[in-house]
Image (cartoon, rainbow, N blue to C red):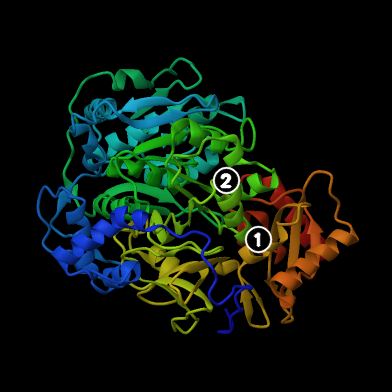
Amino acid sequence: MTSANTAPQPRRPEEPEPLWQPDRARVDSARITRFQAWAAQHHGAPAGGGYAALHRWSVDELDTFWKAVADWFDVRFSTPYETVLADRSMPGATWFPGATLNYAEHALRAAEDPARADEPALVHVDETHEPAELSWSGLRRQVGSLAAELRRLGVRPGDRVSGYLPNIPQAAVALLATAAVGAVWTSCAPDFGARSVLDRFQQVEPVVLFTVDGYRYGGKEHDRADVVAELRRELPSLRAVVHIPLLGTPAPEGTLEWSSLTESDNEPVFEQVPFDHPLWILYSSGTTGLPKAIVQSQGGILLEHLKQLGLHCDLGPGDRFFWYTSTGWMMWNFLVSGLLTGTTVVLYDGSPGFPDTGAQWRIAERTGATLYGTSAAYVMACRKADVHPARDYDLSRVKCVATTGSPLPPDGFSWLHEEAVPGVWIASVSGGTDVCSCFAGAVPTLPVHIGELQAPCLGTDLQAWDPQGKPLTEEVGELVVTKPMPSMPIRFWNDPDGHRYHDSYFDMYPGVWRHGDWITLTSRGSVVIHGRSDSTLNRQGVRMGSADIYEAVERLPEIRESLVIGIEQPDGGYWMPLFVHLAPGSSLDDALRSRITATIREQLSPRHVPDEIIEVPGVPHTLTGKRIEVPVKRLLQGAALDKAVNPGSVDNLDLLRFYEDLARKRS
């Protein structure tokens, strides 16, 4: 960032009409409305002023707000806390010192209600699209049985327990049983190769590994026996391996059978642990080195997810929560936390587009989802494939469609509003693995404007800053959070002096969390996400997020996907190529080049017309589906492939070789 100048916002009227507006009945019935009235009575929150006033109070009175959240959701502190926030420095904030609790105890509370014990806690769907249910009492029984077996295996509080598992009920049971004993959960999806898994698990030295023999995806079976064998060889810390026969194969020698560990009828015993006791370890994408092993706490995640799911997502008993995800993405952990609110959680294990592009909508119909979450990329794929969810599926129970993973383009908002679930609440949300939550997104009582996230989340002092640390409104700036959130990492694993943690978020603005995204905060209080700031396009001091380019270019039917890179040249110049992956049957002729150029010039900025438009065989992604921009930039600057990217973090390494070869030819 060499200039404080920022790009004007792409064509947005000063006072646009909302795409969606909640009616009075919806506002009055929303849990966040009831919370505000209660917090006004008991904790001094503003009774009027709507969400804007509540949010201002939540960041100005941070301690009181989080006490109110704990009280509203009846968080069970087995020993009381001394104060809410003993130290608010970042990094190093100390939340609820003295308190003890257990995350899994809260996730299973609905099973204590006799009227709900036989209702479904989990609904599992595979590629047959036939739902299978596990009741609250059944889930509690399995967690109790498995937690007792983990203790018999010698698993103690603080030990790491790992899962190489797809999005199946067994994964949720294993997570909850791990939390119940006070151990630390960590997981990878079975489409990760051995090297990718070892890059993660070897850092944290798990004592137990839960694994499947394979998985089904895209109508095919994928055997993982060889990968599992390699994991067992390369993880000497393992004391036990638990076999889940998803493909029906017998347990390998020396492993334990899942069924034998979950067949007893033990009442769960919940280890009461300090508020900041580790709950799980998540991983950054690891595109430029070993993935960061991000440790989050039992209490911090409990409070953050109760707030996010129970207030922002408006979830509770009677709801069904479906988000397309895998166990290798933080959204899986977020999804399982739906249990905290007494919500039925829908777990889908399979391809997002099998047997056809409309598959996720069919699952939402079959499971009666009330909140359906997916990726912006899937929404745009449905639009391009001419999918008509409203016509072809009964989505009458869907109250909210949420998207994340990348900014939802304006065309995506319009398509969801008109073709998917007409008149539905659309919640585009943005957060990160780093906090396992959202910085901005869903608010059931606010209007939705095309291309915008509704508002910053409660308790999140979200701001846009220029390079000098000046807050900006209606201008592009760095996404920063100026006050601590309870789900911020308590540390990184194997980072004893905190150096790597500090450098990841607090290096640019000391004491302030810099997330690495470009955002605009509008004068109405909404938020626009422009993409990663470390891959921002900066021409002549005018900055633009890559997401703005993708949104415009990928409207063209000939463009399947695109990748734009801005590279500072040694002579002071700036080279900005646009790489395009074409739809079948399309060719990059002069006419298409002209249309791409005209689209960017007219819809965005003449300064951001690419210097070259280059056809590529594909766009590389991380294993969690994000476009790889910074490593491609490094390759084009001449870095060797093994220096530019961690090969185990990429979905298709051969695609990166194309960019490496291009750099070699250019030099």
Left or right of residue 72, residue 651 in this image: right
Residue type at mark 2 is Ala
Distance of mark 1 from mark 2, alpha carbons? 19 Å
Q: Which of 612 and 642 is in front in this view?
A: 612
Provide the residue designation for mark 1: 551
**Label 1 element class:** helix
- Give the crowd class for mark 2: few <14, some 14-19, many >=20 residues within 10 Å: many
Q: Which of marks 1 and 2 is in front?
A: 2
**Label 2 element class:** helix
Q: Which residue is drawn at 54% across and 39% down?
A: 192
Q: Residue 590 carries which label?
A: none
- Give the crowd class for mark 1: few <14, some 14-19, many >=20 residues within 10 Å: many
Query: Where residue 235 appears, x then y in whole percent?
Result: 42, 36
Provide the residue designation for mark 2: 420
Quadrant of the image occupied by residue 241? top left
Q: Which residue is drawn at 38% across and 26% down?
A: 133
